[in-house]
Amino acid sequence: MSDTFGQAVLLGGTPFREPFVQKGPFEMHDADQLEAVIAAHAAGKLGSID
């Protein structure tokens, strides 16, 4: 038995029905946008959670 609690979030809604590409935690409309956001993340331009 554990003394810690877990947390979960379950989201639901109407599907977008639009194409997307995904890699790791990133999802974008196309491969160019995906590459751009991955580069921005690697450069530290997306901020941080403290």
Image (cartoon, helix red, strand yellow):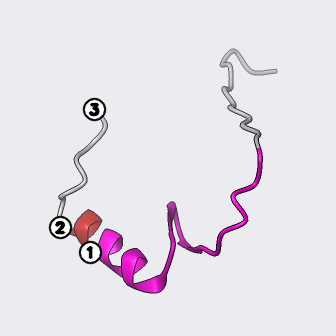
Is 34 included in the stretch rendered in magenta? yes
Residue 10: name its quadrant. Answer: top right
**Residue 23 point in image, percent of width and height:** 53, 73
The quarter of the rendered structure image containing the C terminus is top left
Give residue 50's mark: 3
Labels 3 & 2 near each other (Cβ < 8 A): no
Q: Residues within 10 Å of mark 2 (few under 14, many from 20)?
A: few
Query: Which residue is tagged 2?
Result: 43
Q: Which residue corresponds to the image point at 66% horizontal and 19% vertical from the top-left? A: 4
- Span of residues in magenta: 14-38
The quarter of the rendered structure image containing the N terminus is top right
Q: Please, what secondary structure does the residue beneath circle 1 have? A: helix
Q: Please, what secondary structure does the residue beneath circle 2 have? A: loop
Q: Earlier in the sequence, mark 3 or mark 1?
A: 1
**Residue 13 point in image, percent of width and height:** 76, 41
Q: Earlier in the sequence, mark 3 or mark 2?
A: 2
**Residue 21 point in image, percent of width and height:** 57, 76
Residue 3: name its quadrant. Answer: top right
C-alpha distance separating marks 3 and 1 = 21 Å
Q: Which amino acid is tagged 3?
A: Asp
Q: Which residue corresponds to the image point at 33% horizontal and 69% vertical from the top-left? A: 37
